[in-house]
Image (cartoon, rainbow, N blue to C red):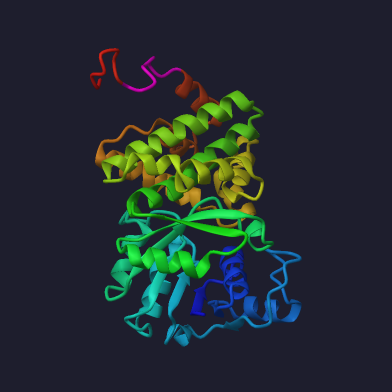
């Protein structure tokens, strides 16, 4: 049995807390918001995000960040924009032997750093891992069979997390490609937002299939330039997470995209849906692609919709009008164009 703290009492943080509790671990959930903790205590559930899912009474709930003291593992379940500040608050209390597992998917605003880099900078003396893959909180919390990936620069840390979290309905695979898992898990939100726009425009299955297929292509292209293994993007943290996020109504990215495709402004769509990680990640990925000289046409067009006021229909036309090319981007002799 491990002593685990989950930082973040949103849907995914609570889903992981429930999973850990059912696995026999001692679990504490921290939140910055006292009203959210009080609501959970009153109702025995988080009605706003996980209605009908009872939170085991054995799970301790607190707003005291010193709860990280003496833990075997802490799991970061904080949105990307707030991850660094929470990590830095916790860092002054954490033991050096505590394993830190990050679940946030995105790039840091301004620095364009991955969340593992943010976590490593915040906890320089601790072992770090990331947990990613196709895992909606609404299903995870209800025990629906789910598979994810854990990645760390220390394989023994990955094995520890795998053994601690795996259960009858939660299967954890180990992957050594930290950057690939992160880029796949982060940028799939961008493509899912674009897929939602297509749905909102009333386009068909053909369009979404093309978007998803070319989307994973540009995600992988960026990832490889950053040092990732291309095969990672055909696994759970790549195509797996892309499928579930593009196709499910649990996906806030897809729901926000649908509203935008229907004519709602991007700002209002995000406000209606709540946390939409793909919104900020689109801007960050757009900037990163230009910085690294990587062509990412879907990301480019979505950024113009979100931040430059381009009508969604025009972006589809722009993508369809791009110059013809070989799908593998090699000529018939196998020479890179």
Q: Over which residues does the magenta segment extend? A: 321-329
- Note whether residue 82 is visible: no
Q: Position of residue 249 (x, y in %)?
A: 66, 46
* Quadrant in which residue 126 is drawn: bottom left
Q: Position of residue 122 (x, y in %)?
A: 32, 72
Task: Give the residue furthest to the top.
Answer: 332
Asked whether, in this view, residue 180 is left or right of residue 142, the answer is left
Residue 232 forms part of the magenta stretch: no
Residue at x 30% of width, y 61% of height: 153
* Quadrant in which residue 221 is drawn: top left
Q: Position of residue 189 (x, y in %)?
A: 50, 46
Vertical arrangement, residue 203 with respect to residue 273, above or below: above
Please give the count of numbered marks on the rendered protein: 0
Task: Give the residue furthest to the left.
Answer: 335
- In which quadrant of the rendered image does the C terminus lie? top left
Asked whether, in this view, residue 232 is left or right of residue 53, the answer is left
Residue at x 31% of width, y 61% of height: 117
Vertical arrangement, residue 105 with respect to residue 99, above or below: above
Vertical arrangement, residue 55 with respect to residue 93, above or below: above
Residue at x 49% of width, y 39% of height: 191
Asked whether, in this view, residue 292 is left or right of residue 55, the answer is left
Residue at x 54% of width, y 57% of height: 171
Q: Position of residue 199 (x, y in %)?
A: 63, 34
């Amino acid at each position: 049995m491990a002593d685990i703290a989950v930082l973040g009492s949103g849907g995914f943080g609570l889903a992981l807390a429930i999973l850990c509790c059912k696995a026999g671990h001692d679990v504490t959930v921290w939140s910055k918001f006292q009203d959210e903790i009080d609501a959970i205590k009153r109702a025995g559930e988080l009605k706003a995000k996980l209605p009908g899912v009872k939170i085991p009474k054995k799970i301790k709930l607190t707003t005291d960040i010193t709860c990280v003291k003496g833990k075997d593992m802490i799991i970061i379940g904080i949105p990307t924009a707030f991850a660094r500040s929470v990590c830095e608050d916790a860092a002054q209390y954490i033991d050096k032997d505590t394993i830190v597992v990050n679940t946030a998917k995105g790039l840091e605003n301004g620095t364009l750093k991955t969340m593992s880099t943010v976590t490593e900078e915040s906890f320089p003396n601790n072992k770090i891992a990331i947990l990613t893959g196709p895992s909606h909180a609404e299903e995870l919390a209800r025990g629906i069979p789910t598979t994810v990936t854990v990645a760390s620069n220390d394989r023994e840390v990955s094995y520890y997390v795998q053994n601690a979290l795996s259960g009858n309905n939660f299967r954890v695979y180990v992957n050594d490609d930290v950057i690939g898992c992160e880029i796949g898990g982060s940028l799939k939100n961008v493509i899912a937002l674009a897929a939602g726009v297509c749905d909102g425009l009333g386009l068909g299955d053909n369009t979404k299939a093309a978007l998803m297929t070319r989307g994973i292509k540009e995600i992988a292209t960026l990832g490889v330039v950053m040092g990732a293994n291309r095969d990672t993007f055909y696994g759970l943290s790549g195509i797996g997470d892309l499928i579930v996020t593009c196709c499910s109504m649990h996906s806030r990215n897809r729901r926000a995209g649908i509203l935008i495709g229907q004519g709602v402004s991007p700002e209002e769509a995000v406000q209606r849906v709540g946390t939409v990680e793909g919104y900020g990640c689109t801007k960050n990925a757009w900037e990163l692609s230009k910085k690294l000289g990587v062509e990412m046409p879907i990301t480019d067009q979505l950024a113009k919709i979100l931040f430059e006021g381009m009508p969604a229909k025009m972006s589809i036309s722009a993508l369809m009008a791009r110059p013809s090319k070989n799908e593998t981007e090699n000529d018939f002799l196998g020479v890179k164009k």
